[in-house]
Image: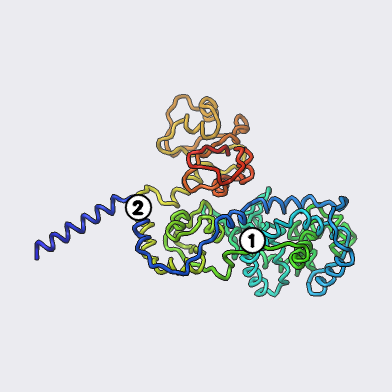
Amino acid sequence: MKKLSLAFVVSFFSLAMFAQQKSPEQYLDSIKGTFDKYTAAQRVDKKWLTELLNSELFAEMESDVERISYQDEVDFYIPKDTLVKRLNELNAKSAFQIEYSESLEKVIKKFIKNRSRSYERLMALSEYYFPMFEEKLAQHNLPMELKYLAIVESALNPKARSRVGATGLWQFMYPTGKQYGLDVNTFVDERSDPIKSTEAAVQYLSELYNLFGNWELALASYNYGPGNVSKAIRRSGGKTNYWEIRSYMPRETQGYVPAFLATMYIYEYHKDHNIIPMRANIPYVQTDTVMVKESMKFDAIAKLLDMNIEELQLLNPAYKSDIIPYYQGKQFSLRLPLDKIAVFTANEEKIYDYFAYEKTFSKESPIEQLIEESNAIASTSSSNRYHTIRRGESLGKIAQKYGMSVTQLKKLNGIRGNTIVAGKKLKVSGTQVASTSSNRYYTVRRGDTLSSIAKKHRNVSVAQLMKKNNIKNAKSIRPGMKLKI
């Protein structure tokens, strides 16, 4: 009996030693091999996801709204009597004042002629986002047509960020987002959370409608600000009809409501213009959430659940750096397709075992790594930027990272020798080196995409990465490549 017990102990410790020798990747595979399987699993087409997540849609819509011209003729034909009839039909069933005008006709024609393909893709995204919009609008007793506003605002891109910093599906600026309870911190930007930002948007729109009494002015104030719309009303002599005070607003706001109405028209009559919607692989109603009990990285979740990381990014856009945080006082959720929810909940203990095991191979948790990366470069709101020295870094390595010479770095910080201390901050840009900030490089890692790389760097888009690095095909990047940021 003692021999048997001894043999068991030896065997147990041998297995434990073997487990400790496994890499996180090997351990992941071994855990995954024991998962309870579900035959209903569906794979989402990666090509479909990549196309839908393309940030060009937002850039196109933003440009169109800003540059709408009512003087240019559009080489596209819609019989005027047909258009008038359709607009009257829309007006009869809408809370908005929709009537024919030459300016609205030109916007509709321009969008159909130049953006038919974009609207086909947007209609696929609509299948995912519109149900959640409609649910929130119904709860607040607001017109269902307001769902089209998110298309004009962000082209249904929850990661969309304007030049002035407005972010998310509903393009909240930081102060307005805070006013409506949207948290923004190192780990999460709730302006990119579809459900929370939609709740904030409907509250804001409801207040704007109560303030102005009609939806056209409510929309204009959503874009231009209620104070500015009030000034436009005063300058017009007290008129409260949007179409009569448009000329007192900036060009972007003049094009904003027509773009909204044109989008409404295209959605209603797309079949008549041969606009064929793409189909959504994962409608919103086929997803659900689980509350996480440990910090998690998207790449590991994707491998464990046989998903594309792009799919996780689409479903969980509020998380920065593809990490779901976990800390006391705040709960965070993971949204997944229903079949993956079943796999996750059935194997939850094993999944958390993996993340616990992964931590033993890393001195820092994903959260700690993210904090360090965030602290490495301090706020860029002033003309100076700072780098927090890490263990093992040299002046040469830091200078190279910011496109500086060692001499510049030493002069900027009053350093005489070459000794630096971990934890201290170095000034890495100011008036002397401000022009070098565009010369940073990033080494592509396994699993990186241009989209994920762009998200890691402030004010960098996929289009900019492709242009700076002469990349024609976004899928052509490989691990080890150095990209100019």
Q: Between tags 2 and 1, which lies in front?
A: 2
Q: Is residue 460 visible?
A: yes
Residue placed farthest to the front in the image?
274
Crowd tier of the residue under label 2, counting other residues whose Cα lies within 10 Å: few below 14, some 14–19, many 20 or above: few
Q: Specify which label sits upstream in the sequence, 2 or 1.
A: 2
Residue 328 screen position, x and y as percent? 44, 61
The residues tagged by marks 2 and 1 sit, at their Cα atoms, a distance apart of: 46 Å
| Image quarter of residue 151 | bottom right
Which amino acid, by three-letter code, is at mark 1? Answer: Gln
Q: Nearer the viewer, residue 426 or 26?
A: 26
Residue tagged 1: 179
- Residue 274 point in image, percent of width and height: 75, 62
As helix, strand or loop, the secondary structure at mark 1 comes to helix
Q: Quadrant of the C terminus?
A: top right
Quadrant of the image for the N terminus? bottom left
Q: Residue 96: horizontal and vertical position, in percent?
A: 80, 69
* Residue ID for mark 2: 26
Label 1 packing within 10 angstroms: few (<14), some (14-19), many (20+): few
Q: Nearer the viewer, residue 48 or 324?
A: 48
Front one among 284 and 252: 284
Q: Are marks 2 and 1 in contact (CB under 8 Å)?
A: no
Q: Is residue 117 above or below residue 267?
A: above
Pick whichever, 195 or 113, lies toward us.
Answer: 113
91 w.r.t. 483: above or below:
below
Which residue is drawn at the image coordinates 72% and 58% (left, top)?
A: 152
Secondary element at image label 2:
helix
